[in-house]
Image (cartoon, grey):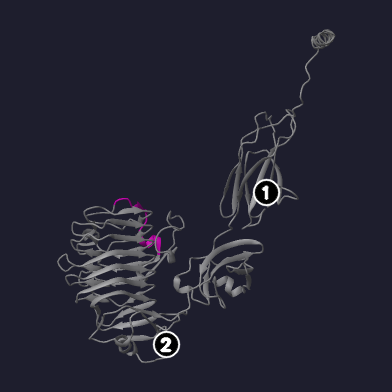
Amino acid sequence: MKKIILYTALMQIVCILFSCNKPSAEVFQPAREFTPTSLSISASDTVVTISWPASVNSASGQTYTVQISEDSSFDGTAALSFITDAIKVMVTDDSIADNTKYFVRVKANQNAAGADSYWLTDTASFKLTGRQIFKTPSSTDIIDVAAILKWTPTAGLTKLVLTDEDNQATDYDLTDAIISEGVDTVYNLKANTTYNAQLLSGSKTMGSLNFTTQLAVSGSNVIDLRSSTDSMVLIETLPTAAPGSIILLKRAMRYNIPSTGYVFNQSVTIRSGLGFGDPAIISMSANFDASGSFDSLTFSDINFATIGSGYVFNIGNVANIGTMSFINCTTSGEFSNSLVRLKTAGDQIGTLEMDGCIFDSIGVGAKYAVVYANASSSAIINNINVTNSTFYNIYYFVREDGVAPASLKIDACTFNNFINQAGYFINYSGTAPATFKINNSIFGSTLDPSSSNGIKSSQGAVFDGCYQTSDCIFSANAFSGVASYSGTAASLFKDPVAGDFSIIDDNFEGRKTAGDPRWQ
């Protein structure tokens, strides 16, 4: 009973104490100008744009502190710290280094409405890549142990730095002559290795480029003809070469194909030996042919020169070739007919590849296509892949009569002075490939606007990122889905008559994205 009375008395005392009318205790909260949400950061080659929401309670003259640091925790001294009254700022590589990962934070500074805000920090990083004055190297500029690097001549360059896959960097001093010429050749590289090249002006990056050196050509299947000075050595070697042989030719040397031509019946690769300078020349009095079934024919870094032949390949036997490839090849002289023609029933090429090539003056004389499969709708090239190449002075590009192949894909190519005398750019005679895509390509002037046709097929090609000049005019079957360039080919290209398709209009929308990359 005593315990109950004591407990009741204590409870009464507590109630009396809490019934007193006193102000509630307040928990202190310092004023904050905004609640951190997010920053907007957009970086390009030489500038980063940073923006954020305005302070909720900001008064006139509100300022902000912006800090940029290599450390996401912002310990130590920031790389850049400044005060601004804007909510959007732009920082260039005059203030911070290129190719360095940075983080950003922002706070509103104290004003009449309250104290400094919390820091608004973005967890994402950014990096400025620096200016890009490097030109895209052609595949012939890169060999196994050396590379030719080219750039837009720019004053103030101080050095070239190459960094390999193991992060080992090598500095190359640049002489005044090299800087003004905009080209340097670097040696003693490792084969089959990816390098990053950087051009520097002091600590500022003026260009960054990745490239991979080629594999050294070696093995028991290599037949090296580079020590021979006999122009007939190639035609004499081919009949005895084992299947799968790689035949190396001496650069700039001429190898003759006689009036009897040559018929391929097994896989072989014919290429110029690695090095710089002009490629080996296959001088053709007559065309190549093929017979039987075999895996592949590859031509790499070869100039096909006609001294009477109307074709490079005119396949008159029954042949089934898995893959035929032309890599970094060119033509000289006028081939009146075709680069590749299948004319016999049952002829088939599984895949025809052209990459890094420049082919001109083909088919105009005889009204033939660069690539032509006829034989009364019974010859077929099942896949055609054309990339990074240039074609000009051609009558027709692709003609496959009445067949339905798997694909035709064209990417990053330049065409000029093409189609006349009622020819077509592409003609499938009422059929179409299952995949039909043309991307990132430029179409210059047609040879005869009154008698030039575009594409004839049962379904149109899908174009993406392509452009045509104002003098690319078709009398029928015009392209659909190709952007128009307001100028002529002569105003877009440096010297199209001489075969120089370097883009000279800095305002051209596709300058860095369309056409054969060597001209960008």
Between 194 and 506, the residue placed more toward the observer is: 194
The residue wearing badge 1 is 72
Residue 226: which disc? 2
Residue 230: which disc? none
Question: Circle 2 sits in a helix, a strand or a loop, which is it?
Answer: loop
Between 479 and 343, the residue placed more toward the observer is: 343
Whether residue 338 can be seen here: no
Q: Residue drawn 53% across and 77% down?
A: 145
Label 2 Cα neighbours within 10 Å, binned few <14 / some 14-19 / many ≥20: some
Residue 331, position in %: x, y? 33, 75
Q: Amino acid at mark 2?
A: Arg
Residue numbers of the magenta segment = 480-493
Label 1 Cα neighbours within 10 Å, binned few <14 / some 14-19 / many ≥20: some
Residue 388, position in %: x, y? 39, 65
Q: Quadrant of residue 419?
A: bottom left
Q: Quadrant of residue 349?
A: bottom left
Residue placed furthest toward the front: 1
